[in-house]
Amino acid sequence: MSKQKLELTWIGKNKRPRLEPRILLEDPARSYHAAHRVTEHDIFDNRLIFGDNLLALKALEQEFTGKVKCVFIDPPYNTGSAFTHYDDGLEHSIWLGLMRDRLEIIRRLLSDDGSLWITIDDNEAHYLKVLCDEVFGRANFVANVVWEKSDSPRMDAEFFSARHDHVLVFAKTLTSLKLNKSQQNDDELPSHYDKTDEEGRRYYLKPLRAMGQADRRVDRPSMFYPLTAPDGSQVLPRKQDGSDGRWRWGNEKVEQESQRIEWVKGRNDWTPYFRIFADMQAGRPPETIWFHGDVGSNRTSKAEVKGLFPDQTAFGTPKPEGLLRRVIELATNPNDLVLDSFAGSGTTGAVAHKMGRRWIMVELGEHCHTHIIPRLQKVIDGTDPGGITGAVNWQGGGGFRYYRLAPSLIVNDRWGNSVINPDYNAAQLAEALCKLEGFSYVPSETRWWQHGHSSERDFIYVTTQNLSAEQLQALSDEVGGEQSLLICCAAFHGVTAARAAERWPNLTLKKIPKMVLARCEWGHDDYSLNVANLPIAAPVPLETMLSPGRGKGVNTNTAIPEQGTLFEVPS
C-alpha cells in the first residue's frame, strides 16, 4: 500500500504535457530602446515574449532556473465570465491542471529567496491555495493578502457585494525569504520632515555647526576649517557670540557627503546645513489588508489604461500600478528580476521598469501588440504620466527586447514523416538541439565544430550533413583526448554506432531528428487557458450514458464525467 497523503485531486491530474523547450527568436523591429541613457542605472535587457505562456516558461527554464526574484501572475479567474481579451469559462478541473503545470515551472525559475504572488478571487482561491501547498510545500505559504479591489458597493448584488480579491503569497524557500518592510506614507512621517529632494525623498535640515556640549574649537581642533559657500566666500564655524566653534563633520566626510549639504543665505552670511532623510525602509511589516486608497482599485486601473489608450476599448481586468508597486517593493530590490507570465495589459513590466527592476513578461493575446508594446514605449520615452510615475519620479530610459516562440522543431512532411522544420536555419537548429540536450548555445568564433558546451571540456556540434568516417576521424583529432564532443548529424556512414564509440571515444554520435522524436509533444503550439484549446476528453458513447447508473452529472458539452470530490486521501 502506497504512503497516503492529503492532496487536492481532479480529473486528469496525472496527465502532464511533454513540453517542447522552444528557442526564442528576437524581432528587432518590435524591440524598443531609449535613444540615449537617462541614468546610469537604465536597464535594456528586459524581455517581452509573444506566445503561449506554458511553452514560454519552458523556454526560459534552461537560462533562468533559480534566477527570478519575484513572480507576479494574474491568471484568468475561471469565473465563467467572457472578457474581451480572454475566454475565461474553463472547466474546473482542467483549469487546475493547467495552473499546476505552470506553477511547477515557476517554482523552478524562482531563486531560493524568491516569492510568488498570485491574484485570484473567491471562485478558485481556496483550491488554488491547496494546489500551491502541493507544488511549493505547505511550509512555504507566506500570506493571503486581501486587496480591496472595489471602492464602492454593488447595489445589484444578489447576496454579497464582493469588495476584495486575494493575493496568495508563497516563498520558494521560506527560511531564505526576506521581505522588505512597508514604506511609510508621507502622512505617517513626523511633521519636521518638511522638505522633499529632487528624487521625492523627504528630509529636514540640521546645522552643520556643532551645537551643545563639546561644540568649541578647542574640543575638536581638527573640525575647525573653512568651507566654501556658493558665492565663493570662506565660512568658518563661528558661534553666535563670535567665538570659534567647530563643524559636526571632518573635512573628509564633508567631501564624501557633499550632496547632503545645503547652503542657506541669511541676512549677512551663508550657513551650511546637512540633510537628514526619512528612513522610508525602516517601516513596519506589511499587513494582510491592502486598501484601495493605498494601492488602487479596479476603477483606478481602468482609468490608468484609459489614460494611456483613450481611443481603444479598455482592457477587461487590469491591475492598478499601485498594487504592483506594493508587491515589487516588498519582494525585490533594484535590479532584481521580476516575471509575469500572464502579462495582460503589461502593468507588471511598466511598474518594474519604473522601479529599476529587470523584467520578463509573456502574453499570447494580440493585446501584446495593441496595448503592451505601446504602453512600454511610453514608459521608456518618459511620456507616461500616470500610475506611479510621479511617486517614483520616473523620467524614462531603458528598453526591452521582443521575442516570439520559434515554431515546433519537428513537423511532418507531405508523406507523414517526421522531419526537421524547414523554417529553421542552421543557427536556429544548433540552438534548438543545444537546449534539448542540455547544452548552452555559445558558438565559438575559432572552432567551427563548437556550437555549445555543457562544461569546459564537453561540447556539441550540429550539422545536417551525412558524415563519413574520414570526417569523423578529422573531428576526433581536432577535439583531442582531453575533451568530448556530441555530434548531432543527419547520418554517418562507413562505420556503425558501436564501432564509432570504440574507434573515437571522445565522440558521441546521434542522428537527427531520430534522437529527439520521443522527447516532446511536437507541433503543439497552444496550451493557453482558452476553452477552444483545451484537451477535452473524447465523447462518451450514447449507450454508455444511457446505461444504468450513468447519466448523472455528465456534461454533454465537454463529455467529462461527474467530477466528484476534489479532496481525497488516495490509497
Image (cartoon, grey):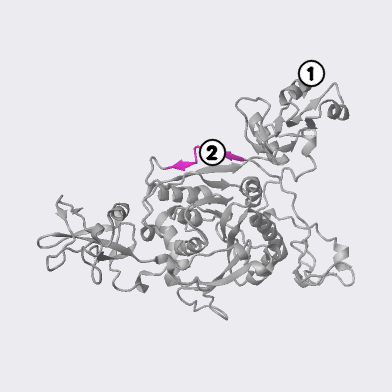
Amino acid of disc 2: Asp
The residue beneath circle 1 is: 470
The residue beneath circle 2 is: 27
Q: Quadrant of residue 85?
A: bottom right
Residue at 62% of width from left, 47% of height from top? Answer: 60
Residue in front for this viewpoint, 118 or 500 = 500
How busy is the neighbourhood of tag 1: few (under 14 within 10 Å), some, or many (20 plus)? few
How busy is the neighbourhood of tag 2: few (under 14 within 10 Å), some, or many (20 plus)? few
Residue 27 among those drawn in magenta: yes
Residue 451's place in the image compared with 521, above or below, is above
* Residue lying furthest front: 218
Q: Quadrant of residue 200?
A: bottom left
Residue range of the region highlighted in magenta in the rendering: 24-33
Amino acid of disc 1: Glu
* Residue lying furthest left: 268
- In this rendering, the count of numbered labels is 2
Residue 425 appears left or right of 309: right
Residue 4 appears left or right of 273: right
Residue at 12% of width from left, 68% of height from top? Answer: 241
Q: Position of residue 62 (x, y in %)?
A: 65, 46
Residue in front for this viewpoint, 281 or 32 = 281
Residue 346's place in the image compared with 129, above or below, is above
Residue at 87% of width from left, 27% of height from top? Answer: 499
Helix, strand or loop under label 2: loop
